[in-house]
Amino acid sequence: MTAEAPTNEVRDAEFKQRFAAVLADIQKTGAEDGEALGLIGHLANDLAKSLQQPNWSTAKKIITPQTYNDLLKIFEQRGNEYHREGKTKHAYAIQALALSLISATMRSDQQMAQGEIFLDAVIDRSVSVYQSLNPVKLN
């Protein structure tokens, strides 16, 4: 007997549960763990800059389907590596960005759309803080 693949409805429900848990955690983390938010800001800043955008939200708007797929594969690979290495805060940062990307595909659900807005605001704030602490030096 082989296990059947989960339906889209089951996957969506599981994603929503994980997304809600991360949103709740990031609210708590934001007040308690500057390092985790710093890692989120650093990673999101680097990705935005690679797409020549000022922040995460604007970078997400121009991501092509191919870039979306590539990023999710990289996030999965690096997130798993960080987790195996015990770098939980690094894995957490990647998870936050991956959830933000995926949530953009579920905007027809009002709760997901509101959660995406909140998560992206936290990410963009983290980028802003990171940029203020690491200003670009012009030659």
Image: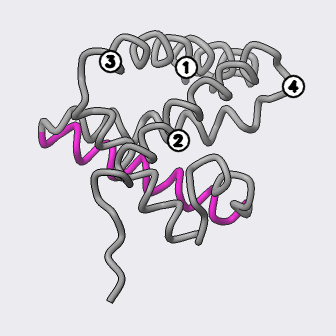
Instruction: Pick out the residue farthest to the left.
Output: 86
Report helix, strand or loop for mark 3: helix
Earlier sequence position, callout 1 versus callout 3: 1
What are the residue bounds of the magenta stretch? 65-85
Q: Nearer the viewer, mark 1 or mark 3?
A: 3
In space, the residues marked 4 and 3 are separated at their CA atoms by 28 Å
The answer to whether 39 appears left or right of 20 in the picture is left
At x 50%, y 17%, the residue is 23
Residue 108 bears which disc, if any? 4
Q: Secondary structure at mark 4?
A: loop
Q: Position of residue 5 (x, y in %)?
A: 63, 26
Residue kind at label 2, given as amino acid type: Asp
Q: Which residue is mark 3?
A: 29
Mark 1 and mark 4: Cα distance apart in space: 15 Å
Q: Position of residue 86 (x, y in %)?
A: 12, 36
Mark 2, residues whose alpha carbon is within 10 Å: few (<14), some, or many (≥20)? many
At 33% from the left and 34% from the top, the residue drawn is 37
What is the distance, in whole Å, between disc 1 and disc 2 at their CAs? 18 Å
User: Along the polypeptide, which appears first: circle 4 or circle 2?
Assistant: 4
- Whole-angstrom CA distance, mark 1 to mark 3, is 15 Å
